[in-house]
Amino acid sequence: MKPGLEGGRGDVRLYDTIDSTNDEARRLSEGGETGPLWVRALEQTQGRGRRGRTWLGEPGNLFTTGLFTLTCGPAEAANLSFVAALAVAEAIDPFVPPHAVSLKWPNDVLIEGKKTSGILLESWQGPHGFHLAIGIGVNVRTSPDGIDQPITCVADHRRTGQSPVSAEILFEGLRARFHDWFDLWAQQGFAPIAKAWLARASGLGQPMIVRLPHETLEGRFHGLAVSGALQLEQADGTIVDVTAGDVFFG
């Protein structure tokens, strides 16, 4: 078993407004906090996504970061982005139509094919060990404009007869499911996480384009490597492991 999240589901620090929940998690770690700890804000002014992209922080949506001190290394800790994605998906499930939620590599959660959540992992070595911040943003009530892909919010897909969901309710479901999935990962490794993630994967077996910093690859989405890398099957049958890139289907 991989130690690292002793202490249950962790305390929650709630802020009215904050620059970035990931930044606050890092500040707390520098002050001696080791976690598990969840930082949540009602509004976020300087949120960010992958590759420095902005993640807008409008009130009514969910902005949270889990802070953890782990004994594994960065490569293995990267598996927790898939744990987080599963937790977000299962937190959203009760509030939208059945089978509406899917997952897109590496860290997007979709509702009916449109992005509603993003996940950003950041790690650093501190005086108390290897620290990991798992930043999660979910469009609960509103969807920001100016995004370069189809985007939506949970409220726009409300299941018939279901009361409106709040960021607080969604957060509590997310936190509970994250720790359940973490326990499974700690006991059995990445295999059951990958299996559950692939069961929800968007585009599995379908043609895809992966844009890398210096080249573009084409092929079919074959699956996940044990590292969590995307496996791209090229026309000649060669399997290429992609560790980072922007994915497009169709």
Image (tube, rainbow, N blue to C red):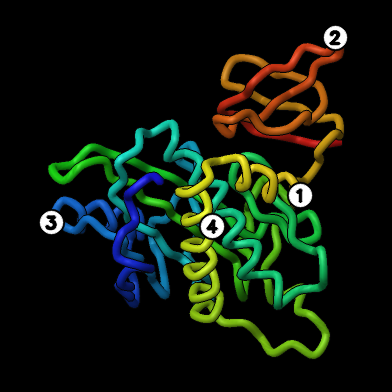
Tell me the residue that label 2 is attached to.
236
Question: Is residue 182 toward the left or the right of residue 24 in the image?
Answer: right
Q: Earlier in the sequence, mark 1 or mark 2?
A: 1
Number of the front mark, 1 or 2: 1
Percent x, y of residue 123: 33, 41
N-term-proximal mark, 2 vs 3: 3
Q: Position of residue 80 (x, y in %)?
A: 49, 47
Looking at the rendered structure, the secondary structure element under dot 3 is loop
Q: Amino acid at mark 2?
A: Asp
Q: Is residue 214 left or right of residue 248?
A: left
Residue under the image location 53 percent in, 45 percent down = 188
- Residue holding disc 1: 199
Q: Is residue 187 above or below residue 51?
A: below
User: Circle 1 sits in a helix, a strand or a loop, which is it?
Assistant: helix
Read off the residue under disc 3: 31
Question: What's the amino acid at mark 4?
Answer: Trp
Of all residues, the one furthest to the top in this rendering is: 236
Residue under pointer 4: 181
Tell me how far mark 2 sits from mark 4, CA to CA: 36 Å
Quadrant occupied by the C terminus: top right
10 Å crowding of disc 1: few (<14), some (14-19), many (20+): few
The alpha-carbon separation of the residues under discs 1 and 2 comes to: 26 Å
Image-based side of 29 in relation to 178, left or right: left
Q: Looking at this view, is 1 or 203 the one in front?
A: 1
Point out which mark residue 113 bears: none
In primary-sequence order, the first of circles 4 and 3 is 3
CA distance separating discs 3 and 1: 40 Å
Q: Earlier in the sequence, mark 2 or mark 4?
A: 4
Report the front residue among 82 and 146: 82
* First in sequence: mark 4 vs mark 1: 4
Instruction: Give residue 144's quadrant in the image.
Output: bottom right
* Mark 3 surroundings within 10 Å by alpha-carbon count, few (fewer than 14), some (14 through 19), many (20 or more): few
